[in-house]
Image: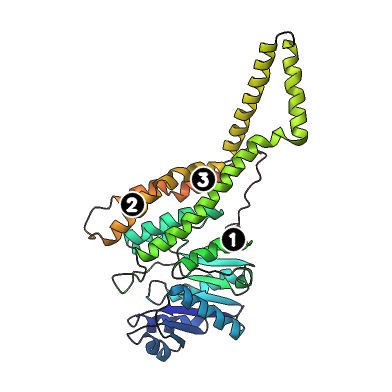
Amino acid sequence: MTALIVVPVFDEAETVGAVVAAARAHGPVLVVDDGSRDGSGEIARRAGAEVIRHPSRRGKGEAIRTGIAVARERGASAVVTLDGDGQHSPSDLGLLLDAARARHRTIVVGGRLDDAAALPPDRLNAIRVASFFVNWACGLKLRDTQSGFRVYPVELFDDIRPRRGGFVLETEVLVAGVARGWRVHEVSVAALARARQRSRFRPISDGVAIGGYLAGQVLIRWALETGALVAAIVRPFYGERRRVRHQATLEQAAQYAGSPPLWAMSVGSSAIQHVINRVALWRRDPRPRRALVAAPATAAAPVLLGLLVLQAFAPRRMPDFVSPLVCWFCSQDRLSSQDRLDAEQSSLTPVANPVGPPS
């Protein structure tokens, strides 16, 4: 596997030189200078990176697209994305590259939540909320869906055509990749405190953009869940199942043939019992159990998003009352635990888990 390390940069003069110098031990480095005004590109060049400069700021998504295009031109088989602000440790590049070499058709993500104390509470909570809804919407079991420390096979972008910009692109790539049958593997990496106080992630504009994209995916998933429930209830009313069920119902009601009211009550109670049984089977299936966990989180999402914005701008000394709410409503442990329960087989078509077995 030949990999090109792509570092999107915007005004990261304080850190980009050290990031490039350390990353070069693992492969060639391309810095995409997204219109920096502080000489970041020149510092990166002196540290040994190839530098491509956007004349004005286009956003992280466009910087990553530029890196992918260059990787294609160079004949690289994989693109590694690494932030230039020092929040990712280049020493972890080997872990991600080893994982990528061992897996076919797999996006490798560096997960930071094993070292969550290094992340500010507002950013950590935003990751938790986004990851919960990404995981539920497309069946993933990924703790840190917002990490920009990744390895993408270049051929992934033959299958998908991400259209979003900014930070949304990274979420879109996961969702679109899983929909096309790509797998996702998470590797635990160090989470480092940034050299600067604030992230380039803008809580309002970037947060709203990601939230809007996820809202669309969540609505699609709820439509699918509603359709699955309706199908589970009505399917036995059609075809051979309907004929068998009707025959059993009529045989049971035959004993009341002399009393039309009792005969009608017997047929009606049989139909009601059938619906109850179908709903009970639906609830024991892993897929709806996950939906029942997602329902309160979906209802609370507008309030949670508002609290995240407030937390991002609140003084650090204020008590953190947002984290307990986020942990309760958007518990990935509860979401994942539903998949570990032994469920009876139902007539629902199961959702294939796109994530490979842990290694």
Q: Secondary structure at mark 1?
A: helix
Q: Position of residue 5 (x, y in %)?
A: 51, 79
Cα distance, mark 1 to mark 3? 21 Å
- Farthest residue in the front direction? 260
Q: Answer whether residue 343 is visible to the viewer in this image.
A: no
Number of labelled discs?
3
Location of residue 344 (image quadrant) = top right
Residue at left 44%, top 47%?
Answer: 298
Observer-nearest of 194 and 305? 305
N-term-proximal mark, 1 vs 2? 1
- Quick check: 128 above or below 189? above
Of tags 1 and 2, the one toward the viewer is 1
Relative depth, front residue between 308 and 57 = 57
Q: Nearer the viewer, residue 18 or 311?
A: 311
**Going from the N terminus, do you reach mark 2 or mark 3 first?**
2
Where's residue 56, x and y in %?
40, 82
Look at mark 1 in the image and give the residue it sits on.
178
- Residue type, numbered disc 1: Val
Label 3, on which residue?
337
Q: Which residue is mark 2?
A: 323
The amino acid on which the numbered mark 3 sits, given as a three-letter code, is Ser
Q: Residues within 10 Å of mark 1 (few under 14, many from 20)?
A: many
Q: Look at the numbered disc 2 and give the secondary structure of its residue.
A: helix
Q: Secondary structure at mark 3?
A: helix
The amino acid type found where label 2 is placed reads: Ser
